[in-house]
Amino acid sequence: MLGFFWPPFSGAQKITYKPQLYFSGEYDDNVEYSNTDKEDSFIFNISPAMELNYGSELFDLYSFAIVRFIRNLSESDFDREDYYIDLSGTYRMTQRLQFRGKLNYFQDKTLEWRTIDLIQTGSGKLPIDDPRKIERGIESVWSDRKTYNAFGSFGYQLTELSNMNAGYGYSKTEYDSENNTDFEVNDVYLAYMRDLAGQKNQIGARMSYNQRTSDISDIDSYGPGVVWSHSFTENVSLYTDLGFRYTEENFKNVDQKNDDWGVTADIRLRRLGETNVMDIGFSQNIQTASDGGAVNVSRLYWSSGHTLSERFFFGLGGDCFITREDGDSLSDIETVYVGISPSLKYWLTENYAVSLAYNYTLEHNRSVEDNRNTERNRVWIVFEFGFPKEW
């Protein structure tokens, strides 16, 4: 990637190039995330990474890539390599027209809270609406997984107070296990926003279409929504997107079709201070489970980071998922998934750090009669080394 992009960047205004290296040790008391036969293990990994940022008056680009070489002390069958590549950018085409794009690929195991989350979240680079987080809580079988994501949008400033955005997103997930089902997702949306008096409120509307395809079924979902954005202060802001959807699911192996109406929601509250940041959000929409079928997913998530001193940084994040196979009533609940992860980072120097993190997860599966609860405890120590350069 560096060789491909380097020639156009030779005359760039600013390029930041940062090789990184991570060493981590991990204890996992339930390696396969089993609700019957738990197996614990100590896991070590080394992770070289590369970050490349480019900035100019018209074009901004961020890229990050990491490879994790994972070795398990007790069971070599769990040894593997994980890959994560992320590329995102903004291009100001004209004074009024702007393009935003994002590409990422990752290869890992399902049912995991990965070290990459600690690395990205601790540095503040992972957005709270990252698509990988939506997968958590609806996976059902331990498996190798490959995921491809692409997103692009155009934003046009109609007037000083109003703008219009159109976007398209594509996602594909592949599993090695035959018990899981590969699926693809296509998303299209069109939104209009307008600033109200005082510049503290934005209100608008959007229309979206979502198509999900797997070997089990084809799912088409349509729906409008009302969008409201409000700035309480310079540091506190709220974003809400509330709407409804109509969904059709056509099964491929049987002559059956399901129609469903539901509510969609995307609510995010952010507080950004000089020494701390906090994000709280709630979302509800239809998702594709790892068995290929449609499920209604309600998700509450939160993350916070606090700079305790010049060298100490404390982070706390968590997720709560509720999945329903059909309808939106509480009686249809299939699975409740909860995860929480505190972490503490100490900067040895400006570019060297050590982190200690803990993660607890609980999955309550109401679709089975016995052993409904699956629990897992994980502890990490991560050593981080950065070697930044700037041109």
Image (cartoon, rainbow, N blue to C red):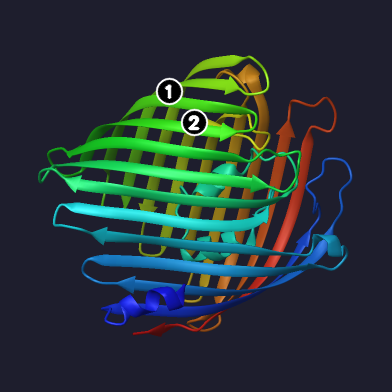
The total of numbered circles placed on residues is 2
Which comes sooner in the sequence, label 1 or label 2?
1
- Residue name at image x 20 percent, y 43 percent: 200
- Identify whether 150 is placed above or below 58: above
Left or right? Give the position of 150 relative to 199. Answer: right
Q: Amino acid at mark 1?
A: Arg
- Identify whether 361 is placed above or below 331: below
Left or right? Give the position of 177 relative to 171. Answer: right
Left or right? Give the position of 66 relative to 197. Answer: right
- Residue name at image x 47 percent, y 35 percent: 283
Q: Amino acid at mark 2?
A: Asn
- Residue name at image x 62 percent, y 49 percent: 340
Q: Which mark is residue 159?
A: none
Residue 240 place in picture, x, y as percent: 35, 36
Residue 210 place in picture, x, y as percent: 44, 32
Few, some or many residues within 10 Å of mark 2 (<14, 14–19, 20+): some
Toward which corner of the image does residue 323 lie, by quadrant?
top right
Residue in the foreground of this view, choosing between 345 and 4: 4
Residue under label 2: 285
Residue under label 1: 245
Q: Work out how far the residue at label 1 is from the one at label 2, CA to CA, in angstroms.
A: 9 Å
Tag 1 and tag 2, C-beta contact below 8 Å: yes
- Residue name at image x 31 percent, y 82 percent: 10
Residue in the foreground of this view, choosing between 133 and 342: 133
